[in-house]
Amino acid sequence: MILKKEFYFVRHGQTDHNIKPNRFEGILPEDIHLNETGRNQAKAIEPVIATLPITTICASPMKRAQETKKIISTRLEATHHCIDYLTECTGEIWCEMAALGMSSSLPLEGRVRLFMDRVQVGINEALSLPGTSLIVAHGGIHWAICCMMGIESHDWSIENCAIVHFSYNAQNKWVARKL
């Protein structure tokens, strides 16, 4: 179960490995940096991030997430945390998740279940920190969050540098809204 605390999520900026649509990057043999487009995407959302009530920033240790975090948080006065459990899954797991589609009612098994369990620990670690958190991570992490929370009416696959606000409604159900 995910702790009931609103938060913001940003998928890292573009890299040379995820330029093609529907290409699942996952963990590559070497950790990769943002490309010029990815750095520009992060710069473009920085003014929006600066207006959000963020006091804690948590990010994957992967270079593309760390670079995005550094660019988008330049005007925020927030504590920074690196959370290993927010590392992206492998490309194989990404493909298995994509094949499942957008349904939190499907049985999750094997590698996907292990990944989901890891993400849950990472998200709860981020949400246990003081104030409102911004999580900077990966597409697979976003998919896992949406699945665990039973998110409806929101695409579980998001583009680079998308900003998503996760909160819960009057019926105590999680909702996600892209900013």
Image (spheres, helix red, strand yellow):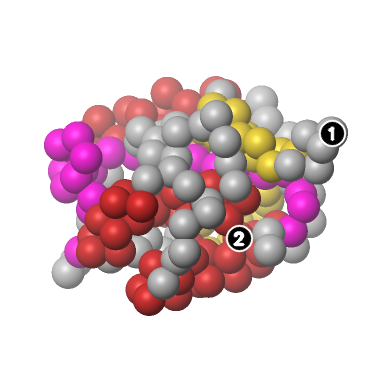
Which residue shows up at 67% across the image and 48% down it?
133
Which residue shows up at 35% across the image and 36% down it?
160
Residue bearing the label numbered 1: 170
Q: Is residue 134 above or below residue 114?
A: above
Which residue shows up at 47% across the image and 26% down it?
45
Judged left or right of residue 111, residue 119 is right
Residue 128 horizontal/vertical position (percent):
74, 63
Residue 84 seen from this side:
no
What crowding class fits label 1: few (fewer than 14 Cα within 10 Å), some (14-19), or many (20 or more)? few
Residue 113 horizontal/vertical position (percent):
45, 71
Residue bearing the label numbered 2: 123
Span shown in magenta: 3-28
Q: CA distance from mark 2 to mark 1?
A: 22 Å
Specify the quadrant of the image occupied by residue 88.
Answer: bottom left
Residue kind at label 2, given as amino acid type: Ile
| Mark 2: secondary structure | helix
* Furthest residue toward right: 170
Name the N-terminal-most of marks 2 and 1: 2
Residue kind at label 1, given as amino acid type: Ala
Specify the quadrant of the image occupied by residue 109.
Answer: bottom left
Judged left or right of residue 47, residue 110 is left
